Amino acid sequence: MNAHDGKVALVTGAASGIGYALCRELHARGATVHAADLNEAGLARLRQECGDRLVTTRLDVADEDAVRDWIERAAAERGRVDYLFNNAGIVVGGDFEAMDRAAWRKIIDINLWGVIHGSQHGYALMRRQGCGHIVNTASTAGVMPVARSTAYATTKHAVVGLSTSLREEGRAHGIRVSVVIPGLVDTNIFSTATNIGGHDYDAAIRKVPIGKISPQRAARAILAGVAANRQYIVFPAYNRLIVGLSRAFPGVM
Ligand code: NAD
């Protein structure tokens, strides 16, 4: 018997990187997975790899009605939802002065409103169920400063605040809330980053003096943190990042 046999898990940002690996891992452990993303090609690949017990939906997490319908439909079809992973996210990098309203709006809509939509409608459903686990993906940029990432850091700090506060509120109702603080994970997020004002996020990240972990390893670390009901799910690379940065900027970090 697998640990996740009979469990129902919903994952956003499922077509690539950490979300993709999470879906595969949950599915391999016996869960029924509802996977959502904007990227239909990635979802099709996931479907092909997993086969049964995996349903995919093209979803924009910035669209509240679509997120609510996706969650409610999964609950109606499966009878309940055990885990909701609000994982979808983007990176916008560049000097603060170069960030215009459109760039701010885009990243806030996806990284923050996307997580609010999932958390709000997932929470409402889990209140009715009397149980469930919401897992929101933040970043190291949600707990420490990262230059030329003010917008990204702003959204991720907000995701940490939302998640840790909601965890307190959910406790009385049997709802668990965790926040994931990945270190660097080897995904497409930096190469597909929006670069404002000529900033090259991918090149900047490549200079960080620590290794990246694979999305598979990240997914396993997330599921271990979920099983232990951790408030903060922190990866080993995070610690190396802090050490690396404190050496690079003595007295600051
Ligand atoms: P990724 O780019 O491989 O995957 C992100 C997925 O989100 C993509 O499939 C993309 O299509 C999807 N997505 C983007 N906008 C969307 C929208 N509006 N609606 C639905 N789906 C949307 O990146 P990843 O590294 O796997 O990122 C997953 C999460 O982990 C993100 O929240 C990211 O901020 C966070 N994170 C990643 C790292 C890292 O080093 N890779 C570090 C810290 C935090």
Image (spheres, helix red, strand yellow):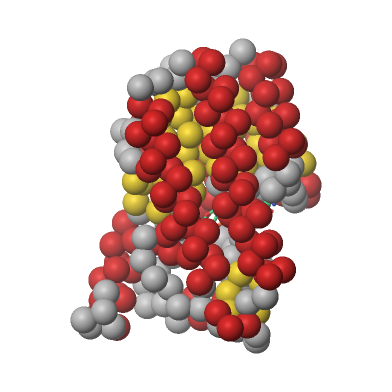
Rendered residue at 48%/65% (across/down): 153
Q: Which residue does the image show at 50% across and 53% down from the upper left?
A: 215
Q: Is residue 23 above or below residue 151?
A: above
Q: Is residue 93 left or right of residue 60?
A: left
Above or below 19: residue 224: above
State the image coordinates of residue 26 (x, y, percent, origin top left). 52, 33
The picture places residue 238, in percent across and down from the top left corner, at 34, 61
Give residue 93's quadrant in the image.
Answer: bottom right
**Left or right for 191, reference 5:** right
Instruction: Classify 145 as above or below 90.
Output: below
How many numbered circles does the render carry? 0
Quarter residue 105 falls in: bottom right
Vertical comparison of 143 with 246: above or below: above
Which residue in the rendered view is the most extreme toward the bottom? 198
Q: Is residue 214 visible?
A: no
Q: Which residue appears at 35% of the width and 34% of the height? A: 168
114 to the left or right of 4:
right
Q: How far across and down, in percent of the image, does residue 77 sit?
A: 69, 16
The quarter in which the N terminus is drawn is top left
Furthest toward the left, the residue is 251
Q: Is residue 125 visible?
A: yes
Q: Quadrant of ligand 1?
A: bottom right
Q: What residue is shown at x 68% (from left), y 45% (from top)?
A: 61
Q: Position of residue 253 (x, y in %)?
A: 27, 74
